[in-house]
Amino acid sequence: MEEEVQAAVAPMFGVLDVVLLAGMAGFGIYWMYFRGSPKAQPPPSKGYTMQPTLITPKANESSYITKMKASGRNIVVFYGSQTGTAEEFAGRLAKEAARYGMKALVADPEECEMEDLCKLSEINNSLAVFCMATYGEGDPTDNAQAFNEWLQSGEADLSGVNFAVFGLGNKTYEHFNAMGKYVDKRMEELGGTRVVEAGVGDDDGNMEEDFLTWKDKFWPAVLDFFGLEMNLQEISMRQYRLVMPDVPSDKLFTGEIARLRAYQTQRPPFDAKNPFLAQVIAWRELHKGGDRSCMHIELDISNSKLRYDAGDHVAVYPVNDPLLVNRFGELLSTDLDTPISLVNIDEDSSKKHPFPCPCTYRTALSYYLDITSNPRTHVLKELAEHTSDPEEKEKLLKMSSSSVEGKELYQQWVLQDNRSLLHILEDLPSCKPSLDLVCELLMRLQSRYYSISSSSKVHPESVHITAVLLKYTTPTGRVNKGVATTWLASKQPSSDQPLHQVPIFIRKSQFRLPARPQTPIVMIGPGTGVAPFRGFIQERMKMKQEGKPVGDTVLFFGCRNRAEDFLYEDEFKECIDDGLLTLHTAFSRETPGKKVYVTHLLKEHGEYIWRVLGQENGHIYVCGDARNMARDVHDIIVDICSNYGKMSVSEAQTFVKKLETQRRYSADVWS
């Protein structure tokens, strides 16, 4: 390098050197500016070039305001939905708008820029409708999380924005309809104008009737608000048109949730739209006798990168009973292996298909559609149009009406008698809708959630499920079976067959052990409510074996008979023998003339429970039935705090509320 520097600064430069350098420089200039200019770079094979100064920017495709203006719509119906019901209600409202001379757009708040709501007043006679479900302990649904945060920010000015809200909830939960009530209240606080009083749907009662009752007030209120005449128009209520696709078999969906061939080529990360195919590596019956069944199932997640904590949930995508699926083909005389695609008639809708398309009828009915639930009234109204017998048609129309007699008939014949759409087709033989209409009317088959009954500290490569096989006889004499548990019951490993696979994903939970293992815990879990506590106990047992100090670990467990359905009895006995677990059991069918439940045991140990909660900063956990058990436990805990803590009832209620806020009183319940 030093020699090169010296040469560069040498005082004498030969003439030949100068000539050569000048020639090279000249050649370079010629090559770059003259020889290269006549030949332009060939265009890409697809003719795509970037010319931002020459191309008019496209409107933001995610802007629902832009879509509404372009298509002449004045109503947008948002939905916050976890199981599909709120989304279904939103779709029904949007379709009905056309009957009143208006045009509506259904929108998922997760896919929208919700700050554009401030611009809705730019559209004449515009209205925002919110069908909002409440999830868990008063929380928004997954797809409404960002919208909820935006409302909480308080920065929007919604002056001139007209709105209406229908909330969906369940009265067995403490924070009943919290999300619907919050949206209704917050929209007004931010300057919005309420067009009609908010509706409140209760899934513990009759959600469909609640919705119809509110809807009967909603449309007249909207017409009156905008000064429009009641001029009903007859329109087709179809949302999708049938297309018979001409595609090779490898282009058909075969049960995948979102991505074609996702089950053939698995790619992490795995979530609700991209489930992991977990192998069933263990399956055993937990009941020792009787005519009921409770399954213990272990799923291998070793190659998934899925992680979980004790208390989380595992979601399973089930498959419908093939016998029920085949029955649709028989009743409607349709080849179930026919490839189909249902395409949204509304080209502006973000939802192009009701389920992954193209696929076959068999795939749709097996993997994507809920064929066992009770159909709602709008479905009966559609079926009536395809019923030839006058009496059968009149029956369907009556049940789909808003009359008192019609509501009572629907309540009895559909809900109490527990008829599915398939049962209705069987009982009304002149009802012959096309199978593509049936596929449009049925709701999406939802994943089933189970409290994980293992600890990842002990079982890092597997997830355990504890599930009762659901099977019962309806008032019409039919035997109904649980979709997911019946399917899981068929997944027992066999030495002469490949391991069965189950599509799953993990849902995180706030149901957590205390950060300090020394903290005492009281767990209340009758029946399969014991599932998450098995994981808690496993985790604390591991800590104890590692020499860590572990606080009191107390379980209240109840079942019918010790000899039949005492779940995980041997495992719990080992933990008792090792000095970790204190177990209180209630066997409701063993005491003649008196049924003993865990609630009775709680009252008997009230003084100890108060000491844990009131003096030792302990935690209490409840898992199981929300309608009866969890509510009774809550009331007993309030009484215990009042009696042993020397408080008034209102003070005890405030104290328990504080425990809940501090997550020292946690519930993992279902209805």
Image: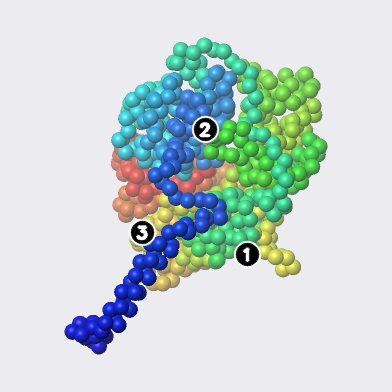
Residue 376: x %, y % from top left: 62, 30
Residue that carries the numbered disc 2 in the rendered image: 106
- Which quarter of the figure has residue 500? bottom right
For disc 3, the neighbor class at 10 Å (few under 14, some 14 to 19, many from 20) is: few
For disc 2, the neighbor class at 10 Å (few under 14, some 14 to 19, many from 20) is: many
Cβ–Cβ under 8 Å for marks 1 and 2: no
Task: Tell me which amino acid carries mark 2.
Answer: Val
| 496 left or right of 626 in image | right
Q: Residue at x 33, y 43 (%)?
A: 658
Residue that carries the numbered disc 3 in the rendered image: 515
Residue that carries the numbered disc 1 in the rendered image: 281
Residue 483: x %, y % from top left: 66, 46
Q: Nearer the viewer, residue 456 or 161?
A: 161
Task: Tell me which amino acid carries mark 3.
Answer: Ala
Task: Tell me which amino acid carries mark 1.
Answer: Ile
Question: Total of numbered circles in the picture?
Answer: 3
- Which of disc 2 and disc 1 is earlier in sequence? 2
Asked if 418 appears above or below 400 in the picture, the reply is: below
In space, the residues marked 2 and 3 are separated at their CA atoms by: 44 Å
Q: Residue at x 81, y 37 (%)?
A: 333
Q: Quadrant of the C terminus?
A: top right
Asked which secondary structure carries label 1, the reply is strand
- Which of disc 3 and disc 2 is earlier in sequence? 2
Q: Residue at x 61, y 61 (%)?
A: 265
